[in-house]
Image: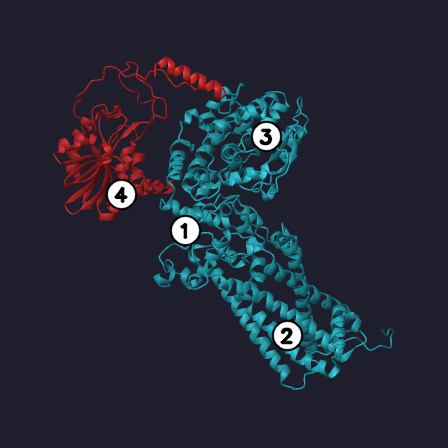
């Protein structure tokens, strides 16, 4: 089996988000980017599959920012190849539909028969990547998956539904999977090994052209504060009085 | 007793009363065999150490040997915390030493001088009489010391002498107990037969100088009172002589093969001991090594192989270890004993070092599990109590860190710990917060704080992670800033250019991350302008002071309590509001045991007017809060009881304690939590020493209640 794990950079919301002057996009030069954490789950799931069934594992990421460290870390964790997609316009960020458009050819060239990627990302404004990819490739598809096992020419994907239902789905290869969670948390790659990989291995690069975007953003703005919780202070008597007052006000 | 010059010269014959001419040569043959067996054992041991890796010792051999001599001769490290055992060991050690020297003297006089230069023989006359008294008293002390040890072993319920494992593994360790008793018993038999020998000889000969053997004479009188006569004493002497000789010779032959090897290995290890063990961990250049969880001789240094032989199973480390005390699977003693048992066979040979042993002999243990489990290794807080208390100088923490490096390499760690390491790698702080938010606390300090990157300052304040990001510790940082500003200290910080100093990362076993953090900090430091550094965090203090010099840091590094102590000595601290409260002080491991800063915080507490009561475990014996060595990131999964709660209870046992004073931002977090969870929140306020000082200086008027609010 050949597995491709598709990763992407997303805005790091721990850091301050800066809007561009026209208010239509994030100022990519001023914000911090990090690997999408669901993609890290997909990578861990792929590594587990590799360990259990001997797959070849290629990690792919478009250069929408500095992806080198993310790709080298994936190699340090045990990926066999790392492919960096480069091209004009990528640095400003791309929509998932565009990313999927680029990836269809790339995945065919890699020869992958299974594609794993994160179930979602914090910048999914136009739907999830896994869905777009499955549509573009025309492969069998499952998303919100929290466990994958290889079974001959197919994959068994564990998928959770509302109400605590769990289903095991059999997907004939080739298949696209949107990973919600890996059975094991993402492993830690020691810095010394990442540094070693940086010295001894290089990233493969491939020139790509992004298709035109399909949606237009009219405006972006930070969420506005609406209401909030009231901390009730004082001794037991005072607290009880205040609670009674609030209940009365709300007409409960 | 007859006196005067007409007396014959005091002396006695060697091999007195031997009637068959072949008996004396037989003794020499047996003695030679014993020595051959002894030297073969030593040779094998040394061979094992030679199979280990090279390790460069820090220089100063004369000082090392002098230090270990003093430790051995005074039984100082054995008697610490345990006077009884110290005295008993000193009796045995000194008596054994004199008796050994005595036997050697007779050998030199009789077997060397007697053959080559009989005119020079000196074992007679006045020397003989002095010799006689010393030997006689030594034999008595030897027996007393051994009986004291036997009584302790048999009747004192000394916890540390129990060999029960704490990691749940089943192991029959009765052989250890038999070995201990045989060691004691054989020495006791040697001592008693030696004394009997003397008594029988006195009954048989009654020489004029019998008073020079006071103890022997008393025993002789006892036997005579029971009816022993000179002829029967002569016969008893002959039999006892051989029993004594046989026991002594087997003991000598047996020394390198059993517990008695500590007579050689522990001394050697005490000399090789590194005073900075764990304080400065070895770098790649100085022999840093990743140690497998199931090591063979080739994976360890000769020094570590010597150390596992040096262990006497005294259990002091087992007793003080905060992990063991809290129900975690780690016992430093068992770690060392597991290594010793495993390396005792072929895995500890040169063949293992050269890789010529079969895979089966060098691989895992029989059940396929690693010798030292991950849980054992992750239990360690690196508090250094084991190293501090070990009487023979075993260095447990660097061994544990070496094996943790293997775990990090394999990614086998608690998920919280992995997250902390990723945060440290990406953001330079374990909280995973924005680098830009590092100095946010400074905005609320209420005083201006210089940017050391753009302005020269006398002191560069290396704030550290917890003091920058943890809300409880931020108040400590703000208070430090106000106090220093009040005292007119010229200081600045690195703002978002500061990274975690890496002390914990290194002790977690993530050496690459430590190097990366150290390089980033060194770059930021080299671009700032300052004369000296001080830190809030004892962990940062340890690595900056002791490990950063290897990365080029050359200036003086202080803890803020040391800086304030200096200012106080210069008379700059004007106490306007003496603090009339009773407090206790907790020594942080990395400030106290690691760097011997015990007095500065105490002097500051007294200066504020507070009454300081000491907890039973104080200074070198301070009990770890449980946060060190990365444990603060791993949660309490391996621990039954939180060490910090045990510590709070210890403080609560003191009469009238109002404040539990700390000098470490991590302690601030650990003990505020522990005081809550242990139910002492209303009774004891947890506060940093800086809060006391701030109140005493009249800057802030916060009471302990407000401080903990």
Side of A218 where B83 appears, left or right: right
Residue B373 is labelled as 1
Dots 3, 4 in contact, CB < 8 A: no
Q: Identify the chain of the residue marked 4, using the numbered disc in the image.
A: A
Give the foreground label among 3 and 4.
Answer: 3
Give the image quarter of residue B417. top left
Secondary element at tag 3: helix
- Please tell me how crowded label 1 is: few (under 14), some (14-19), or many (20+) other residues with Cα within 10 Å: some
Q: Subunit of mark 1?
A: B
Answer left or right for A210 relative to B26. left
Question: In the rendered image, which residue does mark 3 sit on?
Answer: B689
**Measured Cα–Cα span from mark 4 to mark 2:** 69 Å
Q: Which residue is mark 2?
A: B244
Q: Are marks 3 and 2 in contact (CB under 8 Å)?
A: no
User: Chain B in the picture: what colour?
Assistant: cyan
Q: Which mark is residue B452?
A: none
């Amino acid at each position: 089996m050949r597995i491709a794990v598709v990763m992407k950079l997303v805005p790091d919301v721990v850091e301050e988000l800066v809007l561009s002057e026209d208010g239509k996009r994030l100022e990519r030069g001023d914000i911090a980017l990090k690997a999408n954490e669901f993609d890290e789950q997909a990578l861990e799931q792929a590594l587990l599959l590799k360990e259990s069934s001997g797959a070849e594992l290629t990690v792919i990421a478009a250069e929408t920012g500095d992806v080198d460290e993310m790709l080298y870390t994936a190699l340090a964790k045990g990926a066999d190849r790392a492919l960096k997609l480069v091209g004009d316009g990528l640095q400003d960020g791309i929509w998932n539909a565009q990313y999927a458009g680029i990836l269809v050819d790339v995945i065919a060239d890699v020869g992958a028969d299974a594609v794993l990627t994160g179930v979602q990302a914090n910048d999914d404004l136009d739907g999830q990547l896994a869905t777009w990819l499955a549509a573009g490739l025309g492969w069998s598809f499952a998303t919100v998956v929290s466990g994958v096992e290889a079974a001959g020419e197919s994959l068994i994907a564990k998928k959770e539904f509302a109400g605590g239902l769990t289903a095991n789905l059999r997907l004939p290869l080739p298949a696209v999977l949107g990973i919600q969670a890996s059975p094991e948390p993402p492993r830690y790659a020691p810095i010394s090994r990442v540094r070693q990989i940086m010295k001894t291995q290089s990233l493969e690069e491939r020139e790509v052209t992004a298709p035109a975007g399909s949606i237009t953003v009219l405006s972006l703005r930070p969420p506005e504060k609406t209401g909030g919780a009231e901390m009730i202070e004082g001794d037991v008597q005072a607290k009880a009085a205040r609670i009674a007052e609030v209940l009365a006000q709300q007409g409960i | 007793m007859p006196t005067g010059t007409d007396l014959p010269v005091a002396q006695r014959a060697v091999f007195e009363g031997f009637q068959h001419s072949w008996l004396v040569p037989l003794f020499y043959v047996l003695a030679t065999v014993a020595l051959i067996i002894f030297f073969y054992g030593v040779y094998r041991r040394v061979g094992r150490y030679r199979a280990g890796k090279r390790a460069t010792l820090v220089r100063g051999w004369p000082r090392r040997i002098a230090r270990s001599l003093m430790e051995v001769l005074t039984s100082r490290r054995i008697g610490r915390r345990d006077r009884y055992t110290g005295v008993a060991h000193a009796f045995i050690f000194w008596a054994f030493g004199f008796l050994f020297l005595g036997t050697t003297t007779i050998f030199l006089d009789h077997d060397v001088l007697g053959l080559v230069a009989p005119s020079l023989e000196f074992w007679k006359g006045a020397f003989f009489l002095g010799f006689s008294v010393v030997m006689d008293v030594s034999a008595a002390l030897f027996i007393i010391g051994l009986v004291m040890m036997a009584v302790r072993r048999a009747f004192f319920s000394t916890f540390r002498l129990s060999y029960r494992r704490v990691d749940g593994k089943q192991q029959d360790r009765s052989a250890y107990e038999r070995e201990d008793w045989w060691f004691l018993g054989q020495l006791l038999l040697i001592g008693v037969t030696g004394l009997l020998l003397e008594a029988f000889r006195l009954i048989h000969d009654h020489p004029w100088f019998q008073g020079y053997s006071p103890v022997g004479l008393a025993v002789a009188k006892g036997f005579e009172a029971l009816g022993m006569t000179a002829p029967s004493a002569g016969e008893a002497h002959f039999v006892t002589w051989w029993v004594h000789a046989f026991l002594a010779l087997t003991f000598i032959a047996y020394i390198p093969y059993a517990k008695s090897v500590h007579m050689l290995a522990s001394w050697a290890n005490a000399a090789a001991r590194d005073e900075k063990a764990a304080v400065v961990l070895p770098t790649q250049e100085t022999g840093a090594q990743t140690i497998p969880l199931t090591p063979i001789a080739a994976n360890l240094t000769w020094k570590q192989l010597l150390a596992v032989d040096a262990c006497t199973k005294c259990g002091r480390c087992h007793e003080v270890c905060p992990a063991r005390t809290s129900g975690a699977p780690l016992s430093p003693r068992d770690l060392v004993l597991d290594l010793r048992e495993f390396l005792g066979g072929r895995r500890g040979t040169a063949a293992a070092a050269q890789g010529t042993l079969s895979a089966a002999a060098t691989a895992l243990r029989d059940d396929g599990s690693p010798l030292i489990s991950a849980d054992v290794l992750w239990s360690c807080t690196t508090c250094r109590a084991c190293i501090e208390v070990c009487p023979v100088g075993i260095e447990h923490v660097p061994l544990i860190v070496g094996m943790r490096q293997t775990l990090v390499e394999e990614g086998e760690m608690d998920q919280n710990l992995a997250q902390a390491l990723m945060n440290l790698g990406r953001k330079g702080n374990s909280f995973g917060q924005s680098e830009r938010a590092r100095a946010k606390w400074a905005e609320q300090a209420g005083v201006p704080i210089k940017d050391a990157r753009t302005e020269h300052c006398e002191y560069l304040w290396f704030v550290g992670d917890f003091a920058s990001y943890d809300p409880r510790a931020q108040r400590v940082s703000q208070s430090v800033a106000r106090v220093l500003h009040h005292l007119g200290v010229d200081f600045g910080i690195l703002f978002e250019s500061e990274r975690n100093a890496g002390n914990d990362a290194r002790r977690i076993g993530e050496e690459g991350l430590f190097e990366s953090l150290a390089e980033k900090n060194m770059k930021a430091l080299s671009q700032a302008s300052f004369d000296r550094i001080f830190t809030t965090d004892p962990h940062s203090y340890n690595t900056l002071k002791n490990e950063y010099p290897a990365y080029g840091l050359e200036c003086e590094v202080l803890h803020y309590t040391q800086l304030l102590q200096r200012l106080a000595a210069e008379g700059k601290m004007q106490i306007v509001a003496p603090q009339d409260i009773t407090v206790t002080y907790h020594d942080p491991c990395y400030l106290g045991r690691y760097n011997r800063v015990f007095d500065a915080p105490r002097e500051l507490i007294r200066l504020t007017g507070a009454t300081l009561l000491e907890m039973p475990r104080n200074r070198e014996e301070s009990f770890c809060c449980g946060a060190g060595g990365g444990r603060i990131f791993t949660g309490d999964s391996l621990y039954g009881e939180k060490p910090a709660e045990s510590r709070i209870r210890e403080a609560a046992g003191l009469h009238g304690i109002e404040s539990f004073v700390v000098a470490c931002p991590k302690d601030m977090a650990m003990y505020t939590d522990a005081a809550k969870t242990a139910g002492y929140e209303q009774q004891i306020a947890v506060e940093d020493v800086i809060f006391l000082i701030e109140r005493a200086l009249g800057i802030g008027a916060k009471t302990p209640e407000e401080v903990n609010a």
